[in-house]
C-alpha cells in the first residue's frame, strides 16, 4: 500500500512528539488503543484556564505510519484552538487531510478518541463533568 | 555503490538467477514446441528439454525423474497432493494430520477437506515452532491417511524433524507429505533418506521463474497415487493435465542444478551473514528472535522489536524490502497466526520483522540494513508511549487498555 505524501511527511517529521507533565492541573492526557491491536496513542494538551485555549499539545504513538501521522496532525490542529473547537474535530477531517485509505480510517478514529479523552481528563481534573463519548468504537 | 532499496524478502520470492534465464531463453523463442506433440521435431525438442529438467530436479532431491509432476507452483502442488490423496485413499480413511503453522495453501486446503467430510488434526507447536512427536503419535488413528507437515517455515525458518515425523506416519500406515517450498534448494532435502512420500515445491523461491512448481510423488515402497484435480489431456501420468510450461520447467531444472552445486557454499555464507545481522540487531534492548535458533533455515531471521509496531517500522526502514508479522500488512487486521502459534502475544507479533537473505545478498547490504533498522527502531521508540512506560517501570500488562 502506498502512503500519501502528507502521511509520509508527518511520519518522517512528526510534529510535537513528547511528554507534558501530567501532574499539572492544566494538562489533560488521553491514552487510547491497545498494544494487542497494534495502535496506542497518547495525546496531551495544556490548557490556559483564563481563555480556555489549548496552548500546547504533545503526542507519542505506537502504531503504523497512518496512526503516527493522525496523531501528529491532531497536535498541530489542537494548538491555539479553544477546548470547544477541539471537541468539534471530526475524524473524517483527518481522513481527508491525510488522504487515508479505508483500512486506515480506524487511525483517525483513534486520534479523535485521544483528543476527547485528553479533554475529558482535563475537565475531570478541573472539577467539570466528564463528557459522553459520542462516537461508537468499532 | 549500494543500490537502494535492498531486497531482503527472499522468502516471498527470489530474483531470477541470470544463468536460469539464459537456459530458459531458447524455449521462449525458437524452441516453442508442445512437449506432448509426439509426431514432429518441435515436440521432440520440447519433450527432451522437459525430460532433462526432470533429471536435474530428481538429482537435487534424490528421486526418480518419473516421480516429478509439474504444476503451476507450490500452492497447486499442495492442493493436488492433499485433495488427490483424500479422494484416492477414501476407502482407507478420512483423517489428515497437519500443524497450525503451515502455509495457507495447506491450511485452507485442509479446511476444504473438513467441509467435504474429512477430519483434520492441527497439531500445536512449541515456542520454537516445533511439533511434539509424542503428540503426533497420539493423534495417529487407523483412519489417518496422510500426515502433512512443512519442511521449513516461511515466517521463522524453523525446520521440523522430518525424518522422525515420516517414521511415525509410516509406522501407523499413513503417507507423509511435506511442503518443501522454503527448504528445497536451500538445505539438503533427500526424499529417500527423509522418508517423504509427497512433496510440494516451487521454482521462484530458489532463483527460478514464477508460475512453475512441482510435486514429488513416490512410485515405489509404497506406490503413491493421487486423483487428478483438473480434467484434460492426461499429462503428467494422468495426475495433472495441461500443456507443460516448457520454459518454466527448463528454468526450474536449471535452478535445481545450480542449487545442487552451490547450496553448501550459499548456506555457509548466508548463515554467517544472517547471524551477524541478528547479533547486531539483538544489541537493541527488548528485541527477540522468533522461532528456533538451532533448527532453522540458514537465510532467515525473524525478530521482534518490542514497543515498536511492525508496519510503522517497515515504513521507517523504507530502504529495505522486508516483511512483518504486523496485522496491518495483511488484509485482515490479525497479526501473524504463525507467530501467535509460537505463543507470542499480539503486541510482540505486531512488532516483528522478517529478513530473508539470498544468494545475491552482500555483506555491504547487511551492514546497511543493520544501521538502518537500529536507527528506525530507536527513532520509533522515542515516539512510542509504550517504550516510555517501559522505561518508567510501568507494567503494561496491568493497564486496562481501551479496546477499540
Image (cartoon, coloured by chain):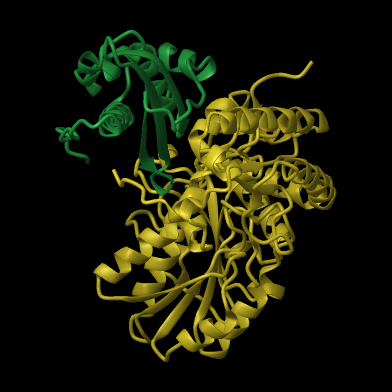
Chain colours: A green, B yellow
- Residue A129: quarter of image: top left
Vertical relation: A111 (above or below) B69 = above
Residue B56 at x, y = what percent? 70, 53
- Residue B204: quarter of image: top right
- Residue A115: quarter of image: top left
Residue A41 located left or right of residue B36: left
Query: In this rendering, does residue B38 appear at all?
Result: no
> Looking at the image, how many numbered discs can be counted on the residues?
0
At horizontal 49% and vertical 83% (from top left) the residue drawn is B174
Query: In this rendering, does residue A70 appear at all?
Result: yes
Residue B146 at x, y = what percent? 46, 77
Residue A136 located left or right of residue A112: left
Residue B36 located left or right of residue B269: left
Residue B34 at x, y = what percent? 49, 41
Residue B261 located left or right of residue B161: right
Q: Is B308 or B367 nearer to us in this picture? A: B308
Vertical relation: A70 (above or below) B158 = above
Work out which quarter of the rendered image holds the C terminus of chain B and state it.
top left
Residue B38 at x, y = what percent? 51, 49
Q: Is A129 or A41 nearer to us in this picture? A: A129
Vertical relation: B294 (above or below) B277 = below
Amino acid at each position: 500500500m502506498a502512503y500519501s505524501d502528507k502521511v509520509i511527511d508527518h511520519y518522517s517529521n512528526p510534529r510535537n512528539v513528547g511528554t507534558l507533565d501530567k501532574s499539572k492541573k492544566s494538562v489533560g492526557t488521553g491514552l487510547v488503543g491497545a498494544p494487542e491491536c497494534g495502535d496506542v496513542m497518547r495525546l496531551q494538551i495544556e490548557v490556559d484556564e483564563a481563555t480556555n485555549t489549548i496552548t500546547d499539545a504533545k503526542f507519542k504513538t505506537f502504531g503504523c505510519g497512518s496512526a503516527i501521522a493522525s496523531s501528529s496532525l491532531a497536535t498541530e490542529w489542537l494548538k491555539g484552538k479553544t477546548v470547544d473547537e477541539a471537541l468539534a474535530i471530526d475524524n473524517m477531517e483527518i481522513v481527508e487531510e491525510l488522504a487515508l485509505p479505508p483500512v486506515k480510517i480506524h487511525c483517525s478514529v483513534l486520534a479523535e478518541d485521544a483528543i476527547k479523552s485528553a479533554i475529558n481528563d482535563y475537565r475531570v481534573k478541573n472539577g467539570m463533568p466528564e463528557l459522553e463519548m459520542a462516537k461508537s468504537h468499532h | 555503490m549500494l543500490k537502494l532499496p535492498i531486497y531482503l524478502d527472499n522468502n516471498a520470492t527470489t530474483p531470477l538467477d541470470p544463468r536460469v534465464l539464459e537456459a530458459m531463453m531458447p524455449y521462449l523463442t525458437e524452441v516453442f514446441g508442445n512437449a506432448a506433440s509426439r509426431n514432429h521435431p518441435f515436440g521432440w525438442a520440447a519433450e527432451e528439454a522437459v525430460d532433462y529438467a526432470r533429471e536435474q530436479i530428481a538429482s537435487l532431491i534424490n528421486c526418480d525423474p518419473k516421480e516429478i509432476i509439474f504444476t503451476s507452483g507450490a500452492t497447486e502442488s499442495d492442493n493436488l497432493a492433499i485433495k488427490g490423496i483424500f479422494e484416492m485413499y477414501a476407502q482407507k480413511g478420512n483423517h489428515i494430520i497437519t500443524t497450525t503453522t503451515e502455509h495457507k495453501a495447506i491450511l485452507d486446503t485442509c479446511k476444504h477437506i473438513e467441509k467435504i467430510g474429512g477430519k483434520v488434526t492441527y497439531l500445536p507447536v512449541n515456542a520454537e515452532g516445533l511439533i511434539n512427536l509424542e503428540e503426533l503419535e497420539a493423534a495417529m488413528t487407523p483412519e489417518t491417511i496422510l500426515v502433512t507437515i512443512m519442511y521449513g517455515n516461511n515466517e521463522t525458518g524453523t525446520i521440523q524433524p522430518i525424518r522422525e515425523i515420516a517414521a511415525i506416519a509410516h509406522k501407523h500406515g499413513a503417507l507423509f507429505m511435506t511442503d518443501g517450498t522454503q527448504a528445497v534448494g536451500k538445505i539438503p532435502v533427500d526424499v529417500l533418506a527423509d522418508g517423504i512420500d509427497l512433496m510440494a515445491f516451487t521454482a521462484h523461491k530458489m532463483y527460478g521463474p514464477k508460475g512453475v512448481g512441482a510435486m514429488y510423488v513416490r512410485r515405489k515402497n509404497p506406490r503413491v497415487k493421487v486423483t487428478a484435480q483438473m480434467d484434460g489431456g492426461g499429462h503428467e501420468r494422468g495426475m495433472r493435465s495441461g500443456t507443460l510450461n516448457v520454459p518454466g520447467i527448463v528454468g526450474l531444472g536449471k535452478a535445481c542444478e545450480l542449487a545442487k552445486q552451490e547450496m553448501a557454499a550459499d548456506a555457509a555464507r548466508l548463515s554467517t551473514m544472517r547471524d551477524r545481522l541478528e547479533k547486531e540487531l539483538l544489541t537493541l534492548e527488548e528485541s527477540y528472535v522468533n522461532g528456533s535458533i538451532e533448527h532453522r533455515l540458514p537465510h532467515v531471521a525473524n525478530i521482534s522489536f518490542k514497543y515498536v509496531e511492525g508496519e510503522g517500522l517497515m515504513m521507517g526502514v523504507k530502504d529495505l524490502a522486508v516483511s512483518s508479522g504486523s496485522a496491518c500488512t495483511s488484509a485482515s487486521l490479525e497479526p501473524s497466526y504463525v507467530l501467535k502459534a509460537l505463543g507470542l502475544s499480539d503486541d510482540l507479533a505486531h512488532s516483528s520483522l522478517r529478513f530473508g537473505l539470498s544468494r545475491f545478498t552482500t555483506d555491504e547490504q547487511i551492514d546497511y540494513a543493520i544501521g538502518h533498522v537500529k536507527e528506525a527502531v530507536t527513532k520509533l521508540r522515542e515516539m512510542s508511549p509504550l517504550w516510555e512506560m517501559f522505561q518508567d517501570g510501568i507494567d503494561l500488562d496491568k493497564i486496562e487498555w481501551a479496546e477499540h
